[in-house]
Amino acid sequence: MPATAQAVNIVNQANYTYKDSTSDNQYQGTSSQINLNPNPLVDPLGRILGCAGALLPDYTGFSVGVYEPNPNDPTGTELGGLVSLTRTELPDIPNNNIPGGKSPNTENSNPYFITNNPAGVYNFLLDPNRGQTNPGKIYIFVVNPPANSVYQQRRIKIEILNSTDNNLVRYLATSLDGQPISTKGETRIEGTVVLVPNAEVVGLDLLAFEFTTNMCQANQVQIVKTGDRAAAEPGDTVIYRLSVKNLSDVALNNVVITDNLPLGFNLIPKSVRGEINGQAVAITPANNGNTITFPTGVNLPVGQVLTLVYAAQLTPDSLRGTGRNSAIVNAERSDNRFSTKDGPATHQLRIGQGIVSDCGTIIGRVFIDKNFDGEQQTGEPGIPNAVIFLEDGNRITTDPKGLFSLANVLPGSHAGVLDLTSVPGYKLAPNKKFRERNSQSRLVRLEPGGLVRMNFAVTPISEEVVKP
Protein backbone atom coordinates (compact mmCIF):
# COMPACT_ATOMS: atom_id res chain seq x y z
CA MET A 1 0.00 0.00 0.00
CA PRO A 2 1.50 3.32 -0.96
CA ALA A 3 2.89 5.46 1.82
CA THR A 4 5.14 8.50 1.99
CA ALA A 5 8.62 8.31 3.43
CA GLN A 6 8.86 10.14 6.75
CA ALA A 7 9.70 13.82 6.17
CA VAL A 8 12.20 15.43 8.57
CA ASN A 9 11.41 19.00 9.62
CA ILE A 10 14.55 21.15 10.12
CA VAL A 11 13.67 24.06 12.44
CA ASN A 12 15.76 27.29 12.55
CA GLN A 13 14.56 29.41 15.49
CA ALA A 14 16.21 31.66 18.14
CA ASN A 15 15.23 32.71 21.69
CA TYR A 16 16.44 36.07 23.09
CA THR A 17 16.56 37.94 26.40
CA TYR A 18 17.67 41.57 27.02
CA LYS A 19 17.48 44.23 29.77
CA ASP A 20 16.65 47.93 29.24
CA SER A 21 19.43 49.80 31.06
CA THR A 22 17.35 52.95 31.51
CA SER A 23 14.32 51.28 33.10
CA ASP A 24 15.78 47.98 34.36
CA ASN A 25 12.96 46.19 32.55
CA GLN A 26 13.84 42.69 31.23
CA TYR A 27 12.42 41.40 27.93
CA GLN A 28 12.22 37.87 26.42
CA GLY A 29 11.14 36.76 22.96
CA THR A 30 11.38 34.22 20.18
CA SER A 31 12.39 34.83 16.57
CA SER A 32 10.18 33.75 13.69
CA GLN A 33 10.45 30.05 12.85
CA ILE A 34 11.97 28.85 9.60
CA ASN A 35 10.98 25.29 8.64
CA LEU A 36 13.04 23.44 6.07
CA ASN A 37 11.03 20.47 4.83
CA PRO A 38 12.99 18.59 2.16
CA ASN A 39 10.93 17.05 -0.63
CA PRO A 40 10.98 13.32 0.30
CA LEU A 41 10.84 10.36 -2.00
CA VAL A 42 7.38 8.78 -2.00
CA ASP A 43 7.27 5.15 -0.90
CA PRO A 44 4.54 2.79 -2.15
CA LEU A 45 5.01 0.08 0.47
CA GLY A 46 3.08 -3.14 0.23
CA ARG A 47 2.92 -6.88 0.68
CA ILE A 48 1.93 -9.81 -1.48
CA LEU A 49 -0.68 -11.92 0.33
CA GLY A 50 -2.62 -15.09 -0.26
CA CYS A 51 -6.20 -15.30 -1.42
CA ALA A 52 -7.55 -15.26 2.13
CA GLY A 53 -5.25 -12.40 3.19
CA ALA A 54 -2.65 -14.67 4.82
CA LEU A 55 1.04 -14.90 3.96
CA LEU A 56 2.07 -17.29 1.21
CA PRO A 57 4.17 -20.23 2.43
CA ASP A 58 7.11 -19.33 0.17
CA TYR A 59 7.98 -16.18 -1.80
CA THR A 60 11.01 -17.62 -3.57
CA GLY A 61 10.94 -16.55 -7.23
CA PHE A 62 8.33 -13.79 -6.82
CA SER A 63 9.23 -10.37 -8.19
CA VAL A 64 7.47 -7.02 -8.53
CA GLY A 65 8.12 -4.14 -10.90
CA VAL A 66 6.83 -0.71 -11.86
CA TYR A 67 6.43 -0.06 -15.60
CA GLU A 68 5.52 2.82 -17.84
CA PRO A 69 2.44 2.08 -19.99
CA ASN A 70 3.10 1.44 -23.66
CA PRO A 71 2.50 4.82 -25.37
CA ASN A 72 1.40 3.06 -28.57
CA ASP A 73 -1.32 1.07 -26.81
CA PRO A 74 -4.65 2.94 -26.82
CA THR A 75 -6.04 0.68 -24.07
CA GLY A 76 -3.31 1.62 -21.61
CA THR A 77 -2.88 -1.97 -20.48
CA GLU A 78 0.30 -3.03 -22.28
CA LEU A 79 3.70 -2.65 -20.66
CA GLY A 80 6.32 -0.17 -21.77
CA GLY A 81 9.75 0.06 -20.19
CA LEU A 82 10.62 -0.23 -16.53
CA VAL A 83 10.37 3.06 -14.63
CA SER A 84 13.83 4.51 -13.97
CA LEU A 85 13.94 4.89 -10.19
CA THR A 86 16.37 7.03 -8.22
CA ARG A 87 19.12 4.93 -6.67
CA THR A 88 19.17 4.86 -2.86
CA GLU A 89 21.33 3.38 -0.14
CA LEU A 90 20.91 2.13 3.43
CA PRO A 91 22.60 3.14 5.66
CA ASP A 92 22.79 6.60 4.17
CA ILE A 93 26.38 7.82 3.64
CA PRO A 94 26.54 11.62 4.05
CA ASN A 95 27.58 13.95 1.24
CA ASN A 96 27.70 11.35 -1.57
CA ASN A 97 24.60 12.64 -3.43
CA ILE A 98 22.82 9.29 -2.97
CA PRO A 99 19.61 9.59 -0.92
CA GLY A 100 18.87 7.23 1.91
CA GLY A 101 16.79 4.18 1.09
CA LYS A 102 14.12 2.22 2.90
CA SER A 103 14.00 -1.43 3.81
CA PRO A 104 13.43 -3.92 2.27
CA ASN A 105 14.28 -2.45 -1.17
CA THR A 106 17.22 -0.50 0.14
CA GLU A 107 18.70 0.27 -3.31
CA ASN A 108 15.31 1.07 -4.91
CA SER A 109 15.77 -1.73 -7.45
CA ASN A 110 13.23 -2.14 -10.22
CA PRO A 111 12.25 -4.95 -10.56
CA TYR A 112 12.57 -6.11 -6.96
CA PHE A 113 12.71 -9.77 -5.93
CA ILE A 114 10.51 -10.64 -2.95
CA THR A 115 12.12 -12.47 -0.03
CA ASN A 116 10.86 -14.57 2.86
CA ASN A 117 12.38 -12.19 5.43
CA PRO A 118 10.46 -9.98 5.67
CA ALA A 119 7.88 -12.21 4.07
CA GLY A 120 6.23 -10.84 0.93
CA VAL A 121 7.11 -7.17 1.55
CA TYR A 122 8.16 -4.77 -1.22
CA ASN A 123 8.56 -1.01 -1.69
CA PHE A 124 9.53 1.48 -4.39
CA LEU A 125 10.55 5.13 -3.94
CA LEU A 126 9.17 7.61 -6.48
CA ASP A 127 11.14 10.86 -6.85
CA PRO A 128 9.04 14.08 -6.86
CA ASN A 129 12.09 15.98 -8.18
CA ARG A 130 11.83 13.91 -11.38
CA GLY A 131 8.08 14.47 -11.69
CA GLN A 132 7.28 10.87 -10.79
CA THR A 133 4.47 11.90 -8.42
CA ASN A 134 2.94 14.59 -10.61
CA PRO A 135 -0.84 14.34 -10.98
CA GLY A 136 -1.74 12.41 -14.11
CA LYS A 137 1.31 10.12 -14.03
CA ILE A 138 0.35 6.52 -14.82
CA TYR A 139 2.25 3.36 -13.93
CA ILE A 140 1.55 -0.35 -14.25
CA PHE A 141 2.49 -2.39 -11.19
CA VAL A 142 3.31 -6.02 -12.06
CA VAL A 143 3.60 -9.08 -9.83
CA ASN A 144 5.48 -11.96 -11.44
CA PRO A 145 5.15 -15.40 -9.80
CA PRO A 146 7.87 -18.04 -10.25
CA ALA A 147 7.84 -20.47 -13.14
CA ASN A 148 5.41 -23.41 -12.80
CA SER A 149 3.48 -21.55 -10.10
CA VAL A 150 -0.25 -22.05 -9.54
CA TYR A 151 -0.51 -18.24 -9.73
CA GLN A 152 -0.51 -16.03 -12.81
CA GLN A 153 1.02 -12.62 -13.43
CA ARG A 154 -0.90 -9.68 -11.95
CA ARG A 155 -1.11 -6.20 -13.48
CA ILE A 156 -2.48 -3.15 -11.68
CA LYS A 157 -2.73 0.32 -13.18
CA ILE A 158 -1.84 3.18 -10.79
CA GLU A 159 -2.76 6.78 -11.65
CA ILE A 160 -1.47 9.66 -9.50
CA LEU A 161 -4.22 12.14 -8.52
CA ASN A 162 -4.27 15.74 -7.31
CA SER A 163 -3.69 16.19 -3.58
CA THR A 164 -4.08 19.21 -1.30
CA ASP A 165 -1.33 17.93 0.99
CA ASN A 166 2.19 17.61 -0.38
CA ASN A 167 2.94 14.84 2.09
CA LEU A 168 0.23 12.59 0.67
CA VAL A 169 -0.04 10.80 -2.64
CA ARG A 170 -3.54 9.99 -3.79
CA TYR A 171 -3.93 7.53 -6.58
CA LEU A 172 -6.38 5.27 -8.35
CA ALA A 173 -5.52 1.56 -8.53
CA THR A 174 -7.29 -0.43 -11.25
CA SER A 175 -7.02 -4.17 -11.76
CA LEU A 176 -6.04 -4.95 -15.35
CA ASP A 177 -6.38 -8.72 -14.97
CA GLY A 178 -9.95 -8.96 -13.68
CA GLN A 179 -8.80 -10.09 -10.25
CA PRO A 180 -9.70 -8.31 -6.97
CA ILE A 181 -7.73 -5.50 -5.32
CA SER A 182 -8.00 -5.29 -1.56
CA THR A 183 -7.07 -2.52 0.87
CA LYS A 184 -6.20 -4.12 4.19
CA GLY A 185 -8.13 -7.21 3.10
CA GLU A 186 -11.48 -5.48 3.62
CA THR A 187 -12.61 -4.77 0.05
CA ARG A 188 -13.12 -7.23 -2.74
CA ILE A 189 -13.27 -5.56 -6.13
CA GLU A 190 -13.34 -7.03 -9.60
CA GLY A 191 -12.75 -4.86 -12.64
CA THR A 192 -13.37 -1.60 -10.77
CA VAL A 193 -11.28 1.18 -9.21
CA VAL A 194 -10.03 1.55 -5.65
CA LEU A 195 -9.34 5.05 -4.26
CA VAL A 196 -6.61 5.17 -1.62
CA PRO A 197 -6.92 8.72 -0.20
CA ASN A 198 -4.07 8.66 2.33
CA ALA A 199 -0.95 7.04 1.00
CA GLU A 200 0.93 7.78 4.21
CA VAL A 201 -1.03 5.37 6.36
CA VAL A 202 -2.71 2.98 3.92
CA GLY A 203 -0.83 0.18 2.20
CA LEU A 204 -1.70 -1.52 -1.06
CA ASP A 205 -2.37 -5.16 -0.16
CA LEU A 206 -2.80 -7.19 -3.30
CA LEU A 207 -5.02 -10.23 -2.60
CA ALA A 208 -3.09 -13.59 -3.22
CA PHE A 209 -3.95 -13.47 -6.96
CA GLU A 210 -6.57 -14.56 -7.29
CA PHE A 211 -3.05 -14.41 -5.98
CA THR A 212 -5.55 -11.93 -5.63
CA THR A 213 -2.16 -9.19 -4.51
CA ASN A 214 -4.11 -11.25 -2.52
CA MET A 215 -2.91 -13.98 -4.89
CA CYS A 216 -5.56 -16.57 -5.54
CA GLN A 217 -4.89 -19.57 -7.72
CA ALA A 218 -5.80 -18.99 -11.33
CA ASN A 219 -7.81 -22.20 -11.48
CA GLN A 220 -9.71 -23.01 -8.29
CA VAL A 221 -12.51 -25.15 -9.68
CA GLN A 222 -12.79 -27.38 -12.75
CA ILE A 223 -15.83 -28.64 -14.61
CA VAL A 224 -15.82 -31.50 -17.13
CA LYS A 225 -18.88 -32.48 -19.20
CA THR A 226 -19.31 -35.81 -20.94
CA GLY A 227 -22.12 -37.68 -22.68
CA ASP A 228 -22.88 -41.36 -23.20
CA ARG A 229 -23.13 -41.08 -26.98
CA ALA A 230 -21.78 -39.14 -29.93
CA ALA A 231 -24.90 -39.27 -32.14
CA ALA A 232 -28.65 -39.63 -31.65
CA GLU A 233 -32.01 -39.07 -33.31
CA PRO A 234 -35.39 -37.74 -32.11
CA GLY A 235 -36.87 -39.98 -29.41
CA ASP A 236 -33.48 -41.05 -28.04
CA THR A 237 -32.35 -40.30 -24.52
CA VAL A 238 -28.85 -39.01 -23.87
CA ILE A 239 -27.20 -39.18 -20.45
CA TYR A 240 -24.88 -36.33 -19.47
CA ARG A 241 -22.32 -36.42 -16.70
CA LEU A 242 -20.84 -33.29 -15.06
CA SER A 243 -17.76 -33.52 -12.82
CA VAL A 244 -16.80 -30.52 -10.65
CA LYS A 245 -13.43 -30.73 -8.86
CA ASN A 246 -12.19 -28.39 -6.11
CA LEU A 247 -8.65 -27.34 -7.12
CA SER A 248 -8.26 -24.59 -4.49
CA ASP A 249 -6.67 -24.71 -1.03
CA VAL A 250 -9.96 -24.37 0.90
CA ALA A 251 -13.45 -25.83 0.71
CA LEU A 252 -15.93 -24.36 -1.78
CA ASN A 253 -19.47 -23.41 -0.80
CA ASN A 254 -22.65 -22.70 -2.79
CA VAL A 255 -21.63 -24.76 -5.80
CA VAL A 256 -24.08 -24.00 -8.64
CA ILE A 257 -23.97 -25.65 -12.06
CA THR A 258 -25.72 -24.01 -15.03
CA ASP A 259 -26.28 -26.10 -18.16
CA ASN A 260 -27.63 -24.80 -21.47
CA LEU A 261 -29.36 -27.58 -23.42
CA PRO A 262 -29.63 -27.41 -27.24
CA LEU A 263 -32.94 -26.78 -28.99
CA GLY A 264 -35.26 -29.78 -28.78
CA PHE A 265 -33.67 -31.33 -25.68
CA ASN A 266 -35.93 -31.87 -22.65
CA LEU A 267 -34.57 -32.58 -19.18
CA ILE A 268 -35.97 -35.62 -17.39
CA PRO A 269 -36.15 -34.21 -13.82
CA LYS A 270 -36.36 -37.57 -12.07
CA SER A 271 -33.09 -38.65 -13.66
CA VAL A 272 -30.96 -36.11 -11.78
CA ARG A 273 -28.43 -37.72 -9.43
CA GLY A 274 -25.50 -36.23 -7.52
CA GLU A 275 -22.76 -37.54 -5.27
CA ILE A 276 -19.50 -36.59 -3.52
CA ASN A 277 -17.08 -39.36 -2.60
CA GLY A 278 -19.84 -41.97 -2.89
CA GLN A 279 -22.31 -39.99 -0.75
CA ALA A 280 -25.58 -38.96 -2.43
CA VAL A 281 -26.30 -35.24 -2.82
CA ALA A 282 -29.89 -34.01 -3.15
CA ILE A 283 -30.22 -31.71 -6.17
CA THR A 284 -33.44 -30.05 -7.36
CA PRO A 285 -33.02 -28.56 -10.86
CA ALA A 286 -34.68 -25.32 -11.95
CA ASN A 287 -35.65 -24.71 -15.60
CA ASN A 288 -35.67 -21.40 -17.42
CA GLY A 289 -36.28 -22.32 -21.04
CA ASN A 290 -33.32 -24.41 -22.18
CA THR A 291 -31.18 -23.15 -19.27
CA ILE A 292 -31.09 -25.57 -16.35
CA THR A 293 -29.69 -24.55 -12.96
CA PHE A 294 -28.51 -27.20 -10.51
CA PRO A 295 -28.11 -25.53 -7.08
CA THR A 296 -26.28 -28.08 -4.96
CA GLY A 297 -25.83 -26.16 -1.70
CA VAL A 298 -22.95 -28.49 -0.84
CA ASN A 299 -19.60 -27.86 0.84
CA LEU A 300 -17.05 -29.30 -1.60
CA PRO A 301 -13.84 -30.26 0.28
CA VAL A 302 -10.37 -29.67 -1.14
CA GLY A 303 -9.55 -32.14 -3.92
CA GLN A 304 -13.01 -33.73 -3.91
CA VAL A 305 -15.23 -34.20 -6.99
CA LEU A 306 -18.95 -33.47 -7.21
CA THR A 307 -20.53 -35.72 -9.85
CA LEU A 308 -23.87 -34.81 -11.41
CA VAL A 309 -25.68 -37.13 -13.84
CA TYR A 310 -28.93 -36.41 -15.67
CA ALA A 311 -30.83 -37.52 -18.77
CA ALA A 312 -32.40 -35.50 -21.58
CA GLN A 313 -34.78 -36.70 -24.27
CA LEU A 314 -34.58 -35.51 -27.89
CA THR A 315 -37.72 -34.13 -29.55
CA PRO A 316 -38.27 -33.57 -33.30
CA ASP A 317 -37.17 -29.96 -32.76
CA SER A 318 -33.66 -31.24 -32.02
CA LEU A 319 -33.15 -31.62 -35.81
CA ARG A 320 -33.23 -27.80 -36.05
CA GLY A 321 -30.71 -27.34 -33.23
CA THR A 322 -26.94 -27.58 -33.04
CA GLY A 323 -26.72 -30.57 -30.68
CA ARG A 324 -24.12 -28.70 -28.64
CA ASN A 325 -24.69 -27.86 -24.99
CA SER A 326 -22.42 -26.17 -22.48
CA ALA A 327 -22.15 -25.99 -18.71
CA ILE A 328 -20.46 -23.63 -16.24
CA VAL A 329 -19.92 -23.82 -12.48
CA ASN A 330 -19.88 -21.03 -9.90
CA ALA A 331 -18.76 -21.38 -6.28
CA GLU A 332 -17.51 -19.38 -3.29
CA ARG A 333 -14.36 -19.87 -1.25
CA SER A 334 -15.27 -20.75 2.33
CA ASP A 335 -12.58 -18.48 3.87
CA ASN A 336 -13.19 -15.10 2.23
CA ARG A 337 -16.33 -15.73 0.11
CA PHE A 338 -14.48 -14.79 -3.08
CA SER A 339 -16.32 -16.18 -6.11
CA THR A 340 -14.71 -18.57 -8.56
CA LYS A 341 -15.98 -20.24 -11.71
CA ASP A 342 -15.03 -22.47 -14.62
CA GLY A 343 -16.41 -23.31 -18.01
CA PRO A 344 -17.99 -23.55 -20.38
CA ALA A 345 -17.52 -27.30 -20.71
CA THR A 346 -19.23 -28.47 -23.89
CA HIS A 347 -20.53 -31.67 -25.47
CA GLN A 348 -21.39 -32.08 -29.14
CA LEU A 349 -24.09 -34.53 -30.24
CA ARG A 350 -24.66 -35.33 -33.92
CA ILE A 351 -28.38 -35.49 -34.68
CA GLY A 352 -30.07 -37.01 -37.69
CA GLN A 353 -32.88 -39.28 -38.89
CA GLY A 354 -31.99 -42.99 -39.05
CA ILE A 355 -28.40 -42.30 -38.16
CA VAL A 356 -28.34 -44.85 -35.35
CA SER A 357 -28.62 -47.86 -37.71
CA ASP A 358 -25.13 -47.25 -39.14
CA CYS A 359 -23.43 -46.29 -35.89
CA GLY A 360 -21.11 -48.42 -33.81
CA THR A 361 -19.70 -48.43 -30.31
CA ILE A 362 -16.29 -47.62 -28.88
CA ILE A 363 -15.41 -49.42 -25.66
CA GLY A 364 -12.22 -49.42 -23.64
CA ARG A 365 -10.54 -49.17 -20.30
CA VAL A 366 -7.72 -47.38 -18.50
CA PHE A 367 -5.80 -49.73 -16.22
CA ILE A 368 -2.50 -50.32 -14.43
CA ASP A 369 -0.40 -52.58 -16.64
CA LYS A 370 1.95 -54.56 -14.39
CA ASN A 371 3.51 -56.82 -17.07
CA PHE A 372 3.56 -54.21 -19.87
CA ASP A 373 1.69 -56.30 -22.42
CA GLY A 374 -1.07 -53.75 -23.05
CA GLU A 375 -3.85 -56.10 -21.89
CA GLN A 376 -5.67 -56.17 -18.56
CA GLN A 377 -5.30 -59.34 -16.53
CA THR A 378 -6.43 -60.34 -13.05
CA GLY A 379 -4.77 -58.14 -10.46
CA GLU A 380 -4.39 -55.17 -12.82
CA PRO A 381 -6.94 -52.66 -11.49
CA GLY A 382 -8.73 -50.01 -13.55
CA ILE A 383 -8.28 -46.27 -13.02
CA PRO A 384 -11.53 -44.36 -12.24
CA ASN A 385 -12.27 -40.80 -13.44
CA ALA A 386 -9.65 -40.96 -16.19
CA VAL A 387 -10.51 -38.67 -19.13
CA ILE A 388 -10.15 -39.58 -22.82
CA PHE A 389 -10.46 -36.86 -25.48
CA LEU A 390 -11.85 -37.77 -28.90
CA GLU A 391 -10.92 -36.02 -32.13
CA ASP A 392 -14.14 -33.92 -32.10
CA GLY A 393 -13.40 -32.53 -28.63
CA ASN A 394 -15.79 -34.76 -26.70
CA ARG A 395 -14.60 -36.22 -23.39
CA ILE A 396 -15.17 -39.69 -22.00
CA THR A 397 -14.71 -40.44 -18.28
CA THR A 398 -14.02 -43.93 -16.96
CA ASP A 399 -16.23 -45.57 -14.32
CA PRO A 400 -14.96 -46.87 -10.92
CA LYS A 401 -13.51 -49.94 -12.68
CA GLY A 402 -11.70 -47.92 -15.32
CA LEU A 403 -14.17 -48.85 -18.08
CA PHE A 404 -15.79 -46.53 -20.62
CA SER A 405 -18.04 -46.85 -23.65
CA LEU A 406 -19.45 -44.52 -26.28
CA ALA A 407 -22.54 -45.64 -28.22
CA ASN A 408 -23.93 -44.39 -31.55
CA VAL A 409 -20.57 -43.37 -33.01
CA LEU A 410 -20.44 -42.72 -36.74
CA PRO A 411 -18.43 -45.32 -38.68
CA GLY A 412 -14.94 -44.41 -39.79
CA SER A 413 -11.60 -43.60 -38.20
CA HIS A 414 -11.58 -42.19 -34.66
CA ALA A 415 -8.73 -41.03 -32.45
CA GLY A 416 -8.61 -40.88 -28.66
CA VAL A 417 -6.04 -39.32 -26.34
CA LEU A 418 -5.62 -40.07 -22.64
CA ASP A 419 -5.50 -36.88 -20.54
CA LEU A 420 -2.57 -37.67 -18.22
CA THR A 421 -3.53 -34.80 -15.91
CA SER A 422 -6.66 -36.78 -15.01
CA VAL A 423 -4.53 -39.67 -13.69
CA PRO A 424 -2.05 -37.94 -11.37
CA GLY A 425 0.83 -40.13 -10.27
CA TYR A 426 0.71 -42.28 -13.43
CA LYS A 427 2.34 -42.30 -16.84
CA LEU A 428 1.82 -44.40 -19.97
CA ALA A 429 3.07 -47.94 -19.48
CA PRO A 430 5.65 -49.09 -22.03
CA ASN A 431 4.28 -51.83 -24.28
CA LYS A 432 6.68 -54.69 -24.99
CA LYS A 433 4.32 -56.35 -27.48
CA PHE A 434 3.07 -53.58 -29.81
CA ARG A 435 5.23 -50.56 -30.55
CA GLU A 436 2.31 -48.39 -31.72
CA ARG A 437 0.67 -48.62 -28.27
CA ASN A 438 3.54 -46.62 -26.73
CA SER A 439 1.80 -43.49 -28.00
CA GLN A 440 -0.48 -41.37 -25.81
CA SER A 441 -3.16 -41.55 -28.55
CA ARG A 442 -5.09 -44.43 -30.10
CA LEU A 443 -6.45 -44.66 -33.65
CA VAL A 444 -9.31 -47.08 -34.30
CA ARG A 445 -11.38 -47.97 -37.35
CA LEU A 446 -15.09 -48.42 -36.65
CA GLU A 447 -17.16 -50.39 -39.15
CA PRO A 448 -20.90 -49.62 -39.63
CA GLY A 449 -22.76 -51.18 -36.72
CA GLY A 450 -19.44 -52.45 -35.36
CA LEU A 451 -17.63 -52.52 -32.04
CA VAL A 452 -14.04 -51.42 -31.50
CA ARG A 453 -11.78 -51.35 -28.46
CA MET A 454 -9.57 -48.46 -27.28
CA ASN A 455 -7.44 -49.34 -24.23
CA PHE A 456 -4.86 -47.23 -22.33
CA ALA A 457 -2.29 -48.87 -20.06
CA VAL A 458 -0.57 -46.81 -17.34
CA THR A 459 2.01 -47.40 -14.63
CA PRO A 460 2.92 -45.46 -11.46
CA ILE A 461 5.51 -42.73 -12.09
CA SER A 462 7.47 -43.66 -8.96
CA GLU A 463 8.00 -47.26 -10.07
CA GLU A 464 10.11 -48.14 -13.09
CA VAL A 465 9.07 -51.80 -12.92
CA VAL A 466 5.88 -53.08 -11.35
CA LYS A 467 5.90 -56.76 -10.45
CA PRO A 468 2.68 -58.71 -10.99
Image: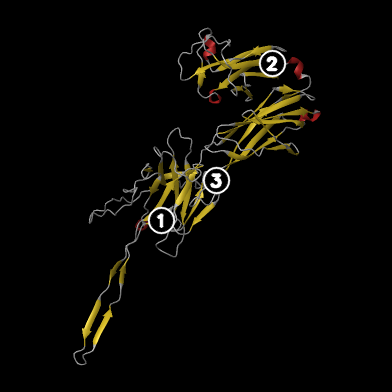
Of tags 1 and 3, the one toward the viewer is 3
Which one is in front, 306 or 201? 306
**Residue 247: x percent and y percent?**
55, 34
Crowding near pointer 1: few (<14 within 10 Å), some, many (20+)? many
Residue type, mark 3 in image: Asn
* Residue 323 numbered mark, or none: none
- Judged left or right of residue 98, residue 268 is right
Residue type, mark 2 in image: Thr
* Residue 336 numbered mark, or none: 3
**Element on which disc 1 rests:** strand
**Element on which disc 2 rests:** strand
Q: Could you give the CA–CA distance between mark 2 and mark 3, rounded to whole angstroms?
A: 47 Å
Q: Earlier in the sequence, mark 2 or mark 1?
A: 1
Does residue 316 sit above or below 106 in this rendering?
above
**Residue 156: x percent and y percent?**
48, 47
The residue under label 2 is 361
The residue under label 1 is 3
Does residue 31 sit above or below 381 in this rendering?
below
**Residue 333: x percent and y percent?**
57, 41
